[in-house]
Image (cartoon, rainbow, N blue to C red):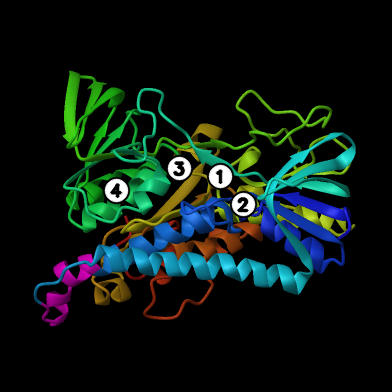
């Protein structure tokens, strides 16, 4: 086994493994080092996303949504069911099977691209050398022409509530619960907190969400955020804004959370707590002395627009660098870097990175929010189309939410598209493509959309921006 490579990728998550595969496709000799360990001590490629994030959470969201529909919606369709319940153990077994199939798939992809998979820890040394510590403790020094750092991120702890794995959980722990808690506390009303809270609420838990910020979903368009808050509260999520958690007392049967808001000091009793206040770059042990790579004040690896660290031949991608902590953003960065290394063209358009929250209704957006556009001083026009007016949404019993299109008032440039409603995560792809090609609202208006489909909502919202909507009164 050679210790010299064209490319060594440190990290096998959604940024690292695509970088390795593309580099292999480009004819380079590649090794990918990954040190992920499952709860049982086994190793698997795929990072947090495949093992304890994107994939398992979507599996649980799907299962819990089916239960909710069976209980609340099937009767409307004329489907009679009685005594519907969830076998949580089977639900978790299904989730684990999906995760296993996904992670094993990476090994097959590596084999096809001739990528050497190395299980263990990688640390960048001076001169593009990499110290590789295998799972059995064996240490080797590898050399490469290029190194890609893709070490990912980890859950951010709350100083006053350290994770204990039993009562106070991180997002991974919340995905592995084998029973439904009577009452679940969620600290943080961001993407992770809302998705996990939704899963266990549908399964029967009382869910209290404590969010320190006064504004709900501040990163989203606020018209969308307002609708989302209304829908989540209707579903029974007890969302308390401006609630700053100061500590917790853990007892034999639960946790007493202490928090303060504008009205004073409070306490709430829950069985378990999920701390979902965000994630931080995971760079522990990543950089050896003399590597030349530097971190910023928040712990992210410093890079330029092309993910170059400033050290010859060394790049960094994904959650360990600036920008949104999104798997698809990391993937595109990994592919870009692998192509640049091979002398090919590579670029990531950070203005067209979509965001999705997989709740019900789903929330997705790309481009600027109404607040951002107005803050920039650029005059804009806005079109909104409610799913209540969509024939397809009515047929699906999924009429909550709307599609929103924002375009420039002067030249009609599409500036942002926001969707809250059924399949929003799928619908947003059309908007991403439109922004990628600098489309106008008129371009969307003149694009024929099949009827009846959910995508017509984006079409009608674009028409509404010019007060020309067909299927909803123009205001």
Q: Which residue is mark 2?
A: 329
Q: CA distance from mark 4 to mark 3?
A: 27 Å
Q: Which residue is mark 4?
A: 197
Tell me: residue 442, above or below residue 289: below
Closer to viewer: mark 4 or mark 3? 4
Q: CA distance from mark 1 to mark 2?
A: 7 Å
Count of numbered circles in the view: 4
Quarter of image, res 242:
top left
Determine crowd level at label 4: few under 14, some 14-19, many 20+ residues with C-alpha closer than 10 A: many
Asked if residue 98 can be seen in this view, the reply is yes
- Are circles 1 and 2 on residues that touch, CB within 8 Å? yes
Q: Which residue is mark 3?
A: 370
Determine crowd level at label 1: few under 14, some 14-19, many 20+ residues with C-alpha closer than 10 A: some
On the rendered structure, is 26 left or right of 262?
A: right
Q: Earlier in the sequence, mark 4 or mark 3?
A: 4
Give the secondary structure at mark 4: helix
Give the secondary structure at mark 3: helix
């Amino acid at each position: 086994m050679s210790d010299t490579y064209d490319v060594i990728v440190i990290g096998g998550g959604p940024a690292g493994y695509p970088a390795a595969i593309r580099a292999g496709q480009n004819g380079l000799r590649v090794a990918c080092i990954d040190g992920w360990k499952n709860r049982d001590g086994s190793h698997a490629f795929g990072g947090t996303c495949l093992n304890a994030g994107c994939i398992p959470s979507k599996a649980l969201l799907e299962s819990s949504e089916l239960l909710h529909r069976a209980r609340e919606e099937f009767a409307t369709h004329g489907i009679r069911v009685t005594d519907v319940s969830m076998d949580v153990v089977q639900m978790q077994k299904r989730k684990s099977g999906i995760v296993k199939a996904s992670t094993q798939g990476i090994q097959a992809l590596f084999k096809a691209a001739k990528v050497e998979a190395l299980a263990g820890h990688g640390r960048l040394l001076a001169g593009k050398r990499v110290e590789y510590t295998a799972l059995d403790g064996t240490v080797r020094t590898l050399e490469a022409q290029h190194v890609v750092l893709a070490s990912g991120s980890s859950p951010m702890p709350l100083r006053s509530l350290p994770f204990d794995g039993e009562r106070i959980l991180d997002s991974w722990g919340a995905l592995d619960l084998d029973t439904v808690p009577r009452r679940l506390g969620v600290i943080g009303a961001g993407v992770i907190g809302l998705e996990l809270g939704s899963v266990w609420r549908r399964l029967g838990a009382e869910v209290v969400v404590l969010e320190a910020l006064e504004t709900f979903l501040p990163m989203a368009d606020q018209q969308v955020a307002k609708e989302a808050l209304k829908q989540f509260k209707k579903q029974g999520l007890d969302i308390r804004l401006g609630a700053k958690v100061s500590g917790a007392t853990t007892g034999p049967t639960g946790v007493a959370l202490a928090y303060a808001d504008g009205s004073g000091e409070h306490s709430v009793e829950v069985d378990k707590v999920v701390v979902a206040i965000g994630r931080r770059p995971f760079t522990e042990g990543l950089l050896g002395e003399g590597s030349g790579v530097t971190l910023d004040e928040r712990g992210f690896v410093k890079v330029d627009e092309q993910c170059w660290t400033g050290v010859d031949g060394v790049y960094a991608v994904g959650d360990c660098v600036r920008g949104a902590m999104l798997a698809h953003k990391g993937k595109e960065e990994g592919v870009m870097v692998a192509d640049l290394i091979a002398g090919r063209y590579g670029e990531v358009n950070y203005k067209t990175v979509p965001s999705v929250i997989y709740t019900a209704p789903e929330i997705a957006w790309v481009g600027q929010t109404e607040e951002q556009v107005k803050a920039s001083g650029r005059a804009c026009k806005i079109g909104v189309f409610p799913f209540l007016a969509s024939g397809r949404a009515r047929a699906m019993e999924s009429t909550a939410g709307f599609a929103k299109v924002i375009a420039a008032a002067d030249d009609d440039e599409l500036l942002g598209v926001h969707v809250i409603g059924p399949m929003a995560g799928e619908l947003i792809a059309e908007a991403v493509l439109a922004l990628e090609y600098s489309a106008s609202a008129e371009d969307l208006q003149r694009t024929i959309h099949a009827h009846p489909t959910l995508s017509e909502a984006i079409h009608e919202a674009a028409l509404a921006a010019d007060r020309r909507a067909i299927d909803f009164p123009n205001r």
